[in-house]
Image: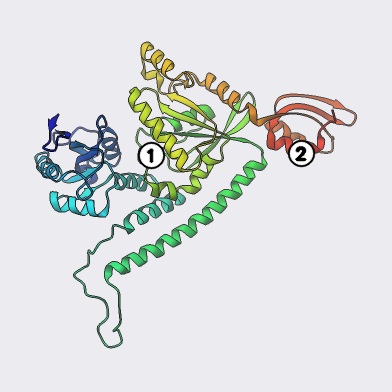
């Protein structure tokens, strides 16, 4: 570590020209980013590098200035900006990537000072979401987030143009080109919001149908690339697409999970990350509604990561859950990928997180224990019922058997006597058949 003139610790690292880094030889892969950050002591740029890799950008080098708050005008201190420019040139970088969300002023000043395009963390994440969005809803959500983020950053790209008008029949206040673009962007934002409200209504109808079936909902939440989709597949026998990249899953996936013969709905949705842009949280509100309404959140973390990184990931997910209004939901901590640990490391993880279930979605280790823990965590949502269902009401009897567990039944002259554990909502619907005690 070098010492800067202001006494703050800084570090600079270069990398060779990117080759053999797993990137495809596309135009985007030829982008070489020099990463910069103003971070407290102990943090690093590993996550930003992984985001850039997912976006198809090679990392040419990095510079960290340890400071509690970024510089309000240039993000890094003025002296470090000069050093960053020299380091970026030495690394043959053609892009500057910043680990925080920049203000429009910081972005503009950095570009002018360094002479290279500047992107911030939010821009990179939005770009990844745009490339991974597959459904019509996902594309609408990403476009809305991008427009809202870029609206405040529109600047006078056409400032050389005079105000429109000036001829006979056209005199008046007119509009500059930038004002026209802002108005068009606002109109598009309003249109996207209306369309997403329609999607939200459609989701509400689908959710009402699921609630009518009285199936308990479990949501998989956690840091992106923790293995949630792989866990969904192995628990439910599905074949949801899985890739070793950040934010591969954007659209919610709902599958049926059976434990001890009782069906549950298991939902997988977008993963979280440190400093997740609030534009995405707002745009994906309809999607994240599934998380807010789940009876149980299964919080999945990468158990093979270093303990410090596990702590950062856990805090980031907890913070995002609070932000989306799911902070009070019951949750179960699951540490995935323990097959990558040796026996000593596994025991250490178990001691550090005694409340967690250790599993490997890849090998199936710990999945039986996970099922048992889920059942115990959801026991509070079940009710014991003693019912006498008339033979003529076979539909109710079939519906009851679909969701009931621990069932005993007896045929009587008046109907079928059923004793079972059922979800609370189903118990309320079947109350008319309850046998008086």
Q: Which mark is residue 247?
A: 1
Rounded to the nearest angstrom, the CA distance separating label 2 from label 1 is: 42 Å
The foreground one among 268 and 292 is 292
- Residue annotated with mark 2: 395
Badge 1: residue crowd in 10 Å (few <14, some 14–19, many ≥20): many
Position of 256 with respect to 244 (left or right) is right
Residue 313: image quadrant is: top left
The foreground one among 231 and 184 is 184
Query: Where 196 sits versus 379, above or below?
Result: below
The foreground one among 379 and 64 is 64
Badge 2: residue crowd in 10 Å (few <14, some 14–19, many ≥20): few
Position of 282 with respect to 21 (left or right) is right
Position of 315 with respect to 71 (left or right) is right
Circle nearer the N terminus (2, 1): 1
The secondary structure type at the circle numbered 2 is: helix
**Would residue 385 be visible to someone looking at this image?**
yes
Residue 392: image quadrant is: top right
Q: Which mark is residue 365?
A: none
Quadrant containing the C terminus is top right
Position of 306 with respect to 366 (left or right) is left
The secondary structure type at the circle numbered 1 is: loop
Taking the view exactly as shown, the residue that stands out farthest to the front is 7
Image coordinates for residue 216, horizontal then vertical, percent:
61, 34
Taking the view exactly as shown, the residue that stands out farthest to the right is 413
Query: Where 179 sits versus 23, above or below?
Result: below
Image coordinates for residue 372, horizontal then vertical, percent:
57, 21
- Find out whether the residues at labels 2 and 1 contact each other: C-beta distance under 8 Å: no
**Would residue 115 be visible to someone looking at this image?**
no
Image coordinates for residue 75, horizontal then vertical, percent:
21, 46
Taking the view exactly as shown, the residue that stands out farthest to the top is 344
Residue at x-position 47% and y-position 25%: 334
Image coordinates for residue 406, horizontal then vertical, percent:
70, 23
């Amino acid at each position: 570590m070098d010492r800067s003139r202001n006494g703050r610790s800084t570090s600079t690292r270069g990398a060779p020209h990117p080759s053999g880094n797993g990137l495809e030889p596309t135009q985007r892969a030829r982008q070489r980013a020099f990463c910069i950050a103003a971070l407290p002591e102990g943090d690093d740029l590993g996550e930003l590098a992984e985001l850039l890799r997912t976006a198809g950008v090679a990392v040419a080098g990095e510079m960290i200035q340890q400071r509690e708050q970024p510089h309000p005008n240039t993000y890094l201190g003025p002296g470090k900006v000069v050093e960053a420019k020299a380091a970026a040139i030495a690394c043959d970088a053609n892009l500057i990537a910043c680990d925080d969300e920049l203000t429009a002023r910081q972005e503009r000043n950095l570009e002018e000072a360094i002479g290279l395009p500047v992107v911030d963390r939010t821009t990179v994440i939005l770009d990844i979401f745009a490339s991974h969005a597959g459904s019509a809803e996902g594309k609408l959500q990403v476009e809305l987030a991008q427009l809202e983020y870029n609206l405040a950053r529109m600047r006078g790209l056409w400032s050389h143009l005079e105000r429109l008008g000036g001829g006979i029949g056209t005199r008046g206040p007119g509009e500059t080109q930038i004002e026209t673009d802002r108005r068009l962007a606002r109109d598009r934002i309003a249109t996207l919001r209306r369309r997403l409200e329609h999607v939200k209504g459609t989701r509400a109808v689908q959710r009402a149908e699921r609630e009518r079936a009285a199936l308990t909902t479990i949501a998989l939440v956690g840091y992106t690339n923790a293995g949630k989709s792989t866990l969904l597949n192995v628990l439910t026998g599905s074949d949801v697409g899985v890739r070793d990249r950040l934010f591969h899953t954007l659209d919610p996936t709902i599958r049926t999970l059976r434990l001890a013969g009782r069906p549950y709905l298991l939902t997988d949705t977008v993963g979280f990350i440190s400093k997740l842009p609030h534009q995405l949280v707002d745009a994906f509100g309809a999607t994240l509604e599934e998380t807010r309404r789940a009876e149980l959140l299964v919080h999945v973390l990468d158990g093979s990561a270093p303990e410090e990184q596990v702590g950062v990931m856990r805090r980031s997910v907890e913070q995002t859950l609070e932000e989306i209004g799911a902070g009070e939901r019951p949750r179960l901590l699951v540490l995935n990928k323990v097959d990558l640990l040796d026996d000593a490391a596994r025991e250490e993880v178990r001691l550090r997180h005694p409340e967690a279930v250790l599993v490997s979605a890849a090998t199936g280790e710990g999945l039986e224990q996970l099922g048992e823990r889920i059942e115990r965590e959801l026991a509070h949502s079940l009710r014991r019922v003693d019912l006498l269902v008339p033979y003529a009401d076979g539909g109710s009897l079939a519906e009851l058997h679909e969701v009931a567990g621990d069932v005993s039944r007896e045929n009587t002259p008046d109907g079928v006597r059923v004793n079972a554990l059922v979800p609370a909502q189903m118990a309320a619907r079947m109350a008319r058949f309850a046998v008086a005690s």
